[in-house]
Amino acid sequence: MEADFLVAVGRSSSHGASAGPVLRDRIGVAARVAARLVVLCLVLALAGCQAVENPANPAPARSSGTSAKTSAVPVELGGTPPTKVTVGDPYYYAPTVSQGTGTISFSIQGQPAWTSFDAQTGALAGTPAAADVGVSGGITISATNSVNSVSVGPFSIEVDPAASTGPATGSATLDWSPPTENIDGSPLTNLAGYSVHYGTSEASLSQTIDVADASATTYVVSGLTPGTYYFAVSAYNSLGLEGAWSNLASKTL
């Protein structure tokens, strides 16, 4: 910054002229210089000034132009539900949950009658009985939070019958021709039914099954465990009189 300085130098007039006008001109220049200095000082003071906060009335904080945001997190479900279970065996499925924002609630559609459902965890559990054999379909488990709703399904659960715990069994089918005569040769007119005799020894057919149907010509003996069996058939009339046994038949299971 440049500044003009006035240096007063006295001089004498050889002509005796008054120095007044010259002094006044210099005074005017000095006043102008002083005014310029005052203005420059004021400008410099304003350029270097800082706002002073009034403790009684603090200035509001200036925003940086950015704000913190809380990201909303969706809920996610995973895991594959079992689709088969056997009568008498426990069934259990709970979806794996990726925790989202807020509280998660669970619901279900198509719930099988033999199961229970936990609305807090989404778990489906139960043990089917023989009456539950079959397929339950259209099962959907849903999870909902403040952000989204997701589902597992629809899926099905097939209930299979329990395996037999006893020994394997078989059967034997017997066929015969109905008698037409009594032992004395007279016509048979009052046939009432048949008796099926069987056992594991041909000398002792200890089991008997009553077939109370005169028109029957076949019968299936079931529930036989492995072994060799012998069979014979006899007819009886309406008086309860039994005729002769047929020839023996056998079957090995």
Image: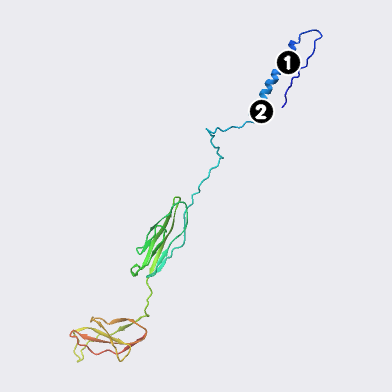
Residue that numbered label 2 is attached to = 44
Q: In this view, does 243 lie to the left or right of 27?
A: left
Residue found at x 31% / y 84%: 174
Residue at the spot 65% in from the left edge and 28% down from the top edge: 45
Cα distance, mark 2 to mark 1?
26 Å
Q: Where is residue 246 in the image (x, y as percent from the top left)?
A: 27, 89
Q: Is residue 80 left or right of residue 185?
A: right
> Residue 14, located in which quarter of the rendered image?
top right
- Estimate how packed mark 2 is, as few (under 14), some (14 to 19) or many (20 or more) residues with alpha carbons within 10 Å: few
Seen from the viewer's position, the closer of residues 150 and 253 is 150
- Asked whether residue 20 appears in the rendered view, the answer is yes
Q: Which residue is labeled 1 in the image?
A: 26
For the residue labelled by badge 2, is the local secondary structure a helix, a strand or a loop?
helix
Query: Which residue is most to the left?
Result: 239
Q: Nearer the viewer, residue 155 or 165?
A: 165
- Along the line of sight, which residue is nearer the eye, 35 or 77? 35
| Residue 177, visible in the rendered structure | no
Q: In which quarter of the image is the N terminus?
A: top right
Instruction: Between residue 14 and residue 136, name the one nearer to us.
Output: 14
* Residue drawn where x is 69% and y is 18% of the image: 31
Quarter of the image where one finds residue 142: bottom left
Relative height, residue 154 to residue 226 (above, below)? above
Q: Residue furthest top?
A: 16
Circles 2 and 1: CB atoms closer than 8 Å? no
Which of the two discs, 2 and 1, labels the residue nearer the N terminus? 1
Residue 38 point in image, percent of width and height:
67, 23
Disc 1 secondary structure class: helix
Q: What residue type is labelled 1?
A: Arg
In the displayed structure, 40 sits above or below 97; it is: above
